[in-house]
Amino acid sequence: MLDLNNKVAIVTGAGRGIGKEIALLLAKEGANVVVNDLGSGLDGTGADVKVADQVVQEIKEFGGEAIANYDSITEYENAKKMVQSAIETFGRIDIVVNNAGIVRDRMVFKMSQEEWDAVIAVHLKGSFNMTSAAAPYFKEQRSGRFINFTSTSGLIGNLGQANYSSAKLGIVGLTKSTAIDMARYNVTANSIAPFAWSRLVGTKPTETDDQKEKVEKIKKMSPELIAPLVAYLATDDASDVTGQIFGVRGKEVILFSQPQPIRSAYNSVGWTVESLAGMKQSFKADFTPVKTSAEVFHWDPLV
């Protein structure tokens, strides 16, 4: 129930950081792994096949099985080829981990169309492409695991990340819809918001003492701490866990709440602009404060 022997996994963005640690642990737990990484820079430009190849080599050195894939997940045909490659090489597909990502941070009043499109393409469209490519096989075999990566930038909010935040909250919607659509086929879909030092986090500014202190705290949270939750959600024991949003912050696992109605107001004659001003006063105490992720998670990580 807890091992991954004979399972086959695709991990996108698996050449470095969190994705690499996931690929390594899945292989150690017995899964055969497709290591996908374009080998691009933080902004999604450039390519380096050695990034994925090195992870494959590490897996083979400890006796695991893996193949490399260097395609961009922004293209649907690439996602289809990746799934087909997993099936041709290992005989099946059981797990898809949508981890790949880039950043193009900019305040919303300065963000370009290209900066918006590029981030949405990798995070949200890429996650959909992989889901769409694998879902028919999961449906046919009546089993499968989708594990998608969201962020507190989307769940809560962050400065200068309108593109990234929108993509990451969109992934939550994709995850929930996938969980609903695939439930009858014993397929699960969950999302994880990771707190860990990575190349993407490494772009955070360190100009002030406060910023430097925050970055130093993040550096204590190793990507290795994210991988066990991914591996667990891929097991048969987690077959009844679906549609959930988790977080991993150091050695702490978090279950996030999801939007539910918390208050309603009724007007028997219908609402007017004037009467809605009174409704605002009724609702105001329950409004969600506008905060950044750092303001919500203000305590030190448990490492």
Image (tube, grey):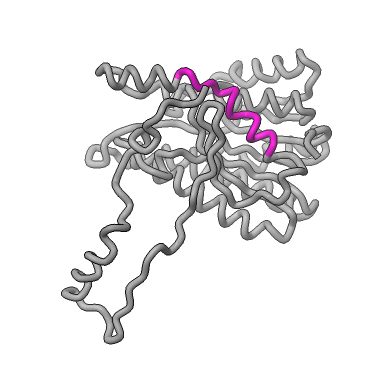
Above or below 278: residue 125: above
Residue 228 lies in the magenta stretch: yes
Residue 268 falls in image quadrant: bottom left
Work out which residue is located at the far top of the displayed protein and give it.
61
Residue 159 seen from this side: yes
- Main secondary structure type of the part rendered in magenta: helix
**Vertical relation: 238 (above or below) 106:** below
Relative to 51, 89 lies left or right: right
Depth check, front residue: 85 or 104: 104
Residue appearing at x 72%, y 29% in the figure: 33
Residue at the spot 50% in from the left edge and 46% down from the top edge: 256
Residue at x 30%, y 36% (from the top left corner):
159
Q: Position of residue 146 (x, y in %)?
A: 64, 44
287 over 23 or under it: above or below: below
Quarter-of-image position of residue 60: top right
Q: Residue 11 in magenta?
A: no
Whether residue 114 is visible here, answered yes or no, is no
Residue 182 in the image, given as x and y percentages of width and height: 67, 57
Q: Which residues are magenta?
A: 219-232
Looking at the image, which residue is at 46% across and 49% down? Answer: 170
**Is residue 106 toward the left or the right of residue 84 in the image?**
left
